[in-house]
Image (cartoon, rainbow, N blue to C red):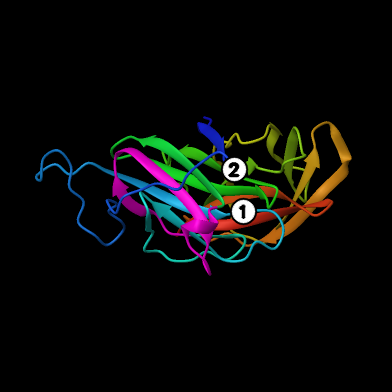
Amino acid sequence: MEFRCYSSFFSLTLHMVAGFLTCALLSSCVKGDDDDSPQRSFITFFNAAEGQQGDVLFYIEGSAVRTGALPSDSNSTYNQVYAGSRLFQVAPAAQNLSALLAESREDLTANKYYSCFLTGSSAQHGLVFCEDSFAGRDSTGKARVRFINISSNADKLDLNLERGKKLFAEQVQNQMSGWAYVDTTRHLVAIYKSGEPKVKLDSINIHPRDGAFYTLYLRKQGDKHKLVSRLIIR
């Protein structure tokens, strides 16, 4: 099963900052068309920008999300927001929307989950959105991992465990994989160019928790690449 992802890029010279204080977030009451049937969506945010961007704040319809500023290579918990058409924006935490990095208007479906990644560099940031699905069987003593290639200069990629087991193959840019099950021992995970097992781009050690869900992503870092693992659900 694949996850649907889509991206939107922003040019500071072509867009004006816009938005209204109409978002409802994790700890707030959310109203829909009917107070008895609130229309909610859920979204987690990742600061996966290249280089040393520093802490950033995500905004929905002009209001900063209540999960707060995100350092580089970190993510929020799932925020509860209104379903429907929503304007998403990102700015440096030390500044405000006058220093906008990226923005995108997206349609959220009620009761669905999403991931939003800040990607790119100071030359051009972008937002990549994925619709998340947690369907599938539970497996005792296992964790679930998925992978997305958000590097600006890496084409098809393979993600392997240290013993040669291939978790994901030929992952193209901005396309989320399905879930793979891994046991809860320590693993060395390595990323390779597809079809070139000697061309390793990066590797990391992970120690998954039983029943947890993880997102791994590859981003560009200078003239190299960086593989990152983030816990999204315990």
* Residue type, numbered disc 1: Ala
Residue 187 horizontal/vertical position (percent): 70, 57
Spatial CA distance of label 1 from label 2 is 23 Å
Q: Is 212 situated above or below 7?
A: below
Determine the residue located farthest toward the bottom in the rendered image. Answer: 94
Q: Quarter of the image holding residue 33? A: top left
Q: Which residue: 53% across, 30% down?
A: 2
Of discs 1 and 2, which sits in the foreground? 2
Along the viewing direction, whichever of 92 and 52 lies nearer the viewer = 92
Residue 214 in sight here:
yes
Q: Cβ–Cβ below 8 Å for labels 1 and 2?
A: no
The numbered mark at residue 200 is none
Q: Secondary structure at mark 1?
A: loop
Residue 117 horizontal/vertical position (percent): 55, 48
Q: Secondary structure at mark 2?
A: loop
Magenta includes 142?
Answer: no
* Residue type, numbered disc 2: Thr
Along the viewing direction, whichever of 63 and 163 lies nearer the viewer = 63
Magenta includes 91?
Answer: yes
Q: Find disc 1 in the rendering and name its residue.
A: 48
Q: Is 174 situated above or below 75?
A: above
Q: Find disc 2 in the rendering and name its residue.
A: 13
Q: Is 28 situated above or below 39?
A: below
Report the magenta residues as a range: 76-100
Is residue 132 shown left or right of residue 73? Answer: left
Q: Which residue: 10% across, 45% down?
A: 35
